[in-house]
Amino acid sequence: MKNYWRMSNFSIFSVFYTYIDHSSYPADRLFVQDKVRIKYKREYAREDSPYRIIFVKWEKRIQHDLKRHWIS
């Protein structure tokens, strides 16, 4: 199941993604575990929902490493 989307942008250095996460943030633990440096841009959630929509950005030069781990 795919829970992320690559956002279109015009940056030559960064890649923007949006992903869905749970309020316990299991995806964030994966980023920390694999020592992936990302920047959190925005987070949206409804009060009655445990799910979050999270916007992040990372450098294009680490894209290959991320694909090996998570993105198929």
Image (tube, rainbow, N blue to C red):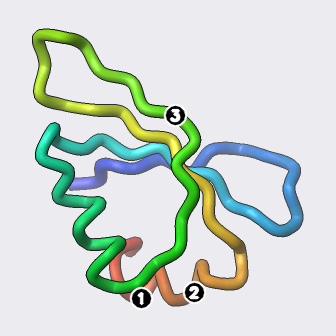
* Circle 2 residue: 64
Quarter of the image with the C terminus in it: bottom left
Q: Amino acid at mark 1?
A: Arg
- Expressed as whole percent of the image width and height from the top left, the position of residue 15 reads 68, 60
Q: Residue at x 63, y 44 (%)?
A: 7
Contact, mark 1 vs mark 2 (Cβ under 8 Å) = yes
- Expressed as whole percent of the image width and height from the top left, the position of residue 63 reads 60, 78
Q: Amino acid at mark 2?
A: His
The residues bearing labels 3 and 2 have C-alpha atoms spaced at a distance of: 24 Å
Closer to the chain start, of discs 1 and 3, is: 3
The residues bearing labels 1 and 2 have C-alpha atoms spaced at a distance of: 6 Å
* Circle 1 residue: 68
Q: Residue at x 39, y 24 (%)?
A: 44
* Circle 3 residue: 42
Where disc 3 sits, the SS reads strand
- Mark 3 or 2, closer to the camera: 3
Q: Is residue 31 above or below residue 25?
A: below
Contact, mark 1 vs mark 3 (Cβ under 8 Å) = no
